[in-house]
Image (spheres, helix red, strand yellow):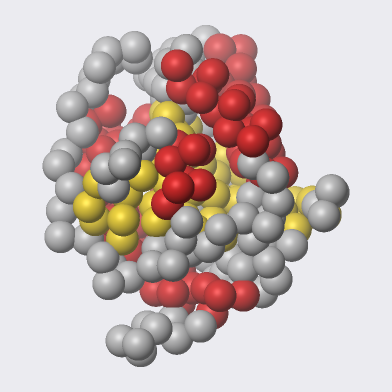
Amino acid sequence: MSQMDFNNNFFNEDIPPIVNSSEPHMACLFLLDTSGSMGFKSTDGVVPIDALNDAMNRFKAQVCQDDKTSDILDVAIVEFNNSINVIQDFSPVEYMQQVNLTARGGTYMAPAIEKAIEMVDERSRFYRRMGTEPYKPWIVMISDGAPLDNISDVSAKLTSLSQSNKLAFWSLSLPGADNKVLHELSGARVLNLIEYNFVGFFDWVNKSMRAVSESSPGEKVMLPPANEAITLDQLG
C-alpha cells in the first residue's frame, strides 16, 4: 500500500485556537493504532479499543484538575488503520472532544507518522506566529502490531528530529506489538502497557505534562517514574 486515504472530519468554530497565548505552550499528539486486532477480546476479557476510549475520555478531566497544565497543553488525536483520520486537530485540552474509536483494517504506520510530524511542526510554527514560546512537542503512538508498510524513511526522520531536540516520539507497546520496530521509531522511548491499564498510562502522561508545565521551554524535564501500568522497555 503506497498511499493511504486521509480524512479530517474535525471542525468546530466554537473552539478557540489557543488559550493564554502569553504563556509557553505544549503540543501533544496521540497517534492511535485502530487496526482490527484492537477489537479482539483479550484472555482477560478486555477489548483494547474500548479500554482505550474509556481512558482517553478520563484523561481530559484529569489534566483539567490542574489549571497550570490545562493552560499550556494542546492535544490532537489521529488514528490509523488502512487510512489516516484526524479525530481532533490541535485544541486546548479543556476543549478535547469525547472519543469513540472503532477497530478495523490493517496497521499502516509510516504515512500516519508523517502526518503527525507535519501536524506538530505546524503547531509549533503557529505558536511562534502567535508570539507564544513552544515546549518540545510530543507524539505518543499506541500500537499493538507490526506495521504492514516500510518505516525506514520515517524512522530516519524521527531519529534526526529527536537528536536535534525538536520532537519527543514515544511508543506505547501493547501485548503482541513488535518492540523491535517501536525501538527503531522511538529509540529508548518505548513503554510496555501492563494488562491493558490505559487509565494508569494516561495518569503517567498527565503527570508528565504537569512536570513540563512546571519547567521552562528548553529546560530538561524530570519525568515521573513508571507506575503500575507501564514498564520502560530496555533496548536489547
Residue 171: % across, % down:
42, 46
Q: Is residue 8 above or below residue 155?
A: below
Of 116 and 17, the residue lying toward us: 116
Of 149 and 114, the residue lying toward us: 149
- Horizontally, is 53 left or right of 5 in the view? left
Quadrant for residue 103, please give it.
Answer: bottom right
Q: Count of labels shown?
A: 0
Q: Is residue 56 above or below residue 72?
A: below
Quadrant in which the C terminus is drawn: top left
Asked whether the viewer can see residue 184, the reply is yes
Residue 226: % across, % down:
18, 48
Q: Is residue 15 above or below residue 134?
A: below
Q: Residue at x 36, y 44 (%)?
A: 190
Hey, which residue is sitting farthest front in the picture? 236
Residue 78: % across, % down:
60, 51
Of 210 and 85, the residue lying toward us: 85
Quadrant for residue 122, please give it.
Answer: top right
Asked whether the viewer can see residue 13, the reply is no
- Horizontally, is 198 left or right of 105 in the view? left
